[in-house]
Image (cartoon, grey):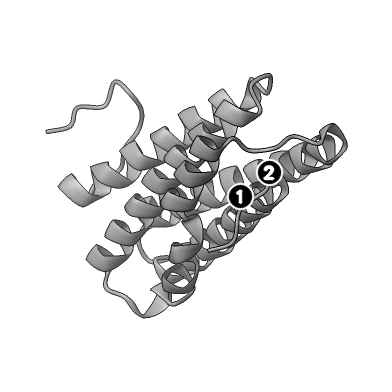
Amino acid sequence: MKDLSINDVLDIAVRAEDLGAKAYADLSKKFSDDENLKDLFESLARDEVEHKLFFMELAKKTSNLKLSLAEVDREFLQGVDLSRFFEPIQKSQNMSKTEIFKLIYDFEKESVLFYVGIRDVVEDEKILDEIIRVEKDHMNRIMKFILTDSQYRGIRDNWS
């Protein structure tokens, strides 16, 4: 794998958020007969669109800053590799509900790691903390469906 630059990393983040938004929009249609799932996927899609716009703006800012990745950051971000989810997510329409939830949970989890890596390089971007928090919330909401096949309403929701 080639050495990553901060521009490469932000391009991957933009692609990941774009792919997530499209996949979640498609999944909301696939599960349109289940109001809870439809609402979940529509909500996730909206969040991903917002995140994509943020990463596009961050890419513009950092292109002028000439940031470089330290070796440890470059190796970490290469190891996380969000791009490995791109093809499976594009094919998720043909998967079972269980397979879809496992895939998108893993994608969200890997996104959190990837965005923590970006935050470590671009330290003054506080909104990255908020995106990471939202991605963690996505994981919680998805896990709730995996565990109980029910709607997750918020942090005070009972997991049993």
Question: Which residue lies at the image location 42% right of the left edge and 51% below the top edge?
Answer: 79
Q: Which mark is residue 13?
A: 1
Residue closest to the far right: 64
Residue closest to the far bottom: 94
Amino acid on which the number 1 mark rests in the picture: Ala
Q: In the rendering, at what x and y percent does residue 119 appear?
A: 58, 29
Question: Which residue lies at the image location 38% right of the left edge and 66% below the top edge?
Answer: 33
- Residue 25 to residue 30: above or below: above
Tell me if mark 1 has few (under 14), some (14-19) or many (20+) residues whose alpha carbon lies within 10 angstroms of its own: many
Q: In the rendering, at what x and y percent does residue 81 appear?
A: 47, 55
Amino acid on which the number 2 mark rests in the picture: Ile
- Viewer-nearest of discs 2 and 1: 2
- Residue 77 to residue 19: above or below: above
Q: In the rendering, at what x and y percent does residue 160 appear?
A: 11, 33
In depth, the one of 92 and 69 nearer the eye is: 69
Q: Which residue is mark 2?
A: 6
Question: Which residue lies at the image location 68% right of the left edge and 19% below the top edge?
Answer: 124
- Residue 101 to residue 129: above or below: below
Mark 1 falls on what kind of element?
helix
Instruction: State the image quarter where residue 3 is shown.
Output: bottom right
Q: CA distance from mark 2 to mark 1?
A: 11 Å
Mark 2 falls on what kind of element?
helix
Residue closest to the far left: 160
In depth, the one of 81 and 154 nearer the eye is: 81
In depth, the one of 22 and 9 nearer the eye is: 9
Q: Going by the image, does 73 lie left or right of 56?
A: left
Indicate which disc, 2 or 1, sits on the residue closer to the N terminus. 2
Q: Going by the image, does 151 lie left or right of 56?
A: left
Question: Which residue lies at the image location 29% right of the left edge and 20% below the top edge?
Answer: 156
